[in-house]
Image (cartoon, rainbow, N blue to C red):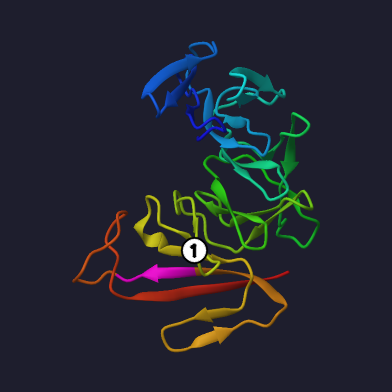
Amino acid sequence: VLGADGRLYCAPLSAPAVLVIDPAGPSTKALGSLGNDQGKWNEGAAGLDGCIYCSPDGETSVLKINPLTEVVERLGQLPEGRRKWTKGVLAPNGLIFCAPLCAETVLVINPARSEVVELCIPTPSGDGSKPKPMGPGRFKWTAGVVGPDGNIYCAPLCAPNVLVIDPQAGACSVLGDLGDGKFKWNEGSLGLDGRIYCSPAMSRESGLLVIEPTGGFAWTRERHRYFPPGFKRVVLLLLLIRRRGRQVGAWGSLPDEVLIGRIIPCLH
C-alpha cells in the first residue's frame, strides 16, 4: 500500500515485521516486531488520516501503520480464527469495510476514533420470517468495490449472492441468487460505465458477473431491456459460450460471443 510519505508498506502475513520499500533509494527496512506466527494480517487499506489499516487473517486485532511516525500498533479485540476477513475498502465516509471470508460479520474500522466493530449480515430466512444473521461458512466473499452509488459490492466466492454494504446506514444486505457453487468469482473492478465486472475464479461455468448498482438498461443479444426506476440494483450473469476461434483474457479463454443467462432485479 502506498503510504502518505511516498513509501510502500507491506503487511506481515507470516513475516515478523512490516516491510517498508522506499522507491527513491531504492531501499527497504523492517518496521515493528510482530512475532513469528503464520497468517497474521492481510493487505492494508489507507485511511483518510494517512495511516494504513490491515485486517486480521489469523490475528485478533487490526494492524495500524503510521507512515509518518513509523509507529505500528494493534486495534481492537476480535474473535480467533483463520482467514477471517478480506482486505479493507475505504468508503466515501472515511470508514474501512472488510468483507467476511470465513468470519460471520463485516469488519468496520473507524480511523477517526481508532475503533473496530463488527457488522451483522442479515440473510433471507426462507420461510417468510425476519432475516437471520449470516451463519458460518468458508470463503464467502471477495474484497468489495465502491459503486457509483457509494455502496460497497462484494462478489460471491462461495456464497450464493452478492454482499452489499451501505456505509452511510451501517447496514448490509444480500443481492441475487447465484447458486451454491464454489470459488465462483474474483474481486470486481468498476468500469467507466458504472458497472462492476467480476471475472470467473476457479469455476469456468460461472461466467462473467456484472453488477449494475444504479439499475437502468440491460442488454441481451436480441434487444435491450429496461427496468423501471423501482428496480435500483441489477445483477447480470453473463454465460460465456465456448467457441473455437480467438482467445483473449488473462484468466482463460474468452469466447467471441457473450450471452446474458440470468437477469435478477432487486427492489430497492
Q: Secondary structure at mark 1?
A: loop
Instruction: Relative to 228, say whether 265 is above or below.
Output: above
In the shown orientation, is residue 59 left or right of residue 114? left
Residue 255 percent across, percent down from the top left: 28, 69
Q: Is residue 238 magenta?
A: yes
For image coordinates 57% across by 49% down, the residue present is 144
Magenta region: which residues?
Answer: 237-241
Question: Does the magenta portion include 235?
Answer: no
Residue 102 in sight: no
Residue found 30% across the figure and 59% down from its top: 249
**Coordinates of residue 17 in the picture (x, y in percent):** 49, 16
Q: Main structural element of the magenta stretch: helix, strand or loop?
A: strand
Quarter of the image that includes the C terminus? bottom right
- Above or below residue 137? Residue 255 is below
Which residue is nearer to you in this view: 181 or 18? 18
Residue 243, horizontal then vertical, whole percent:
24, 72
Residue farthest left in this picture? 245
Position above or below: 222 against 241: below
Q: Is any part of residue 171 visible from this angle?
A: yes
Q: Which residue is at a point 56% across and 55% down the rendered structure image?
A: 160
Answer with the quarter of the image where residue 143 lies: top right
Front-lying residue, 213 or 30: 30
Is 240 placed left or right of 9 in the picture? left
- Residue that badge 1 annotates: 191
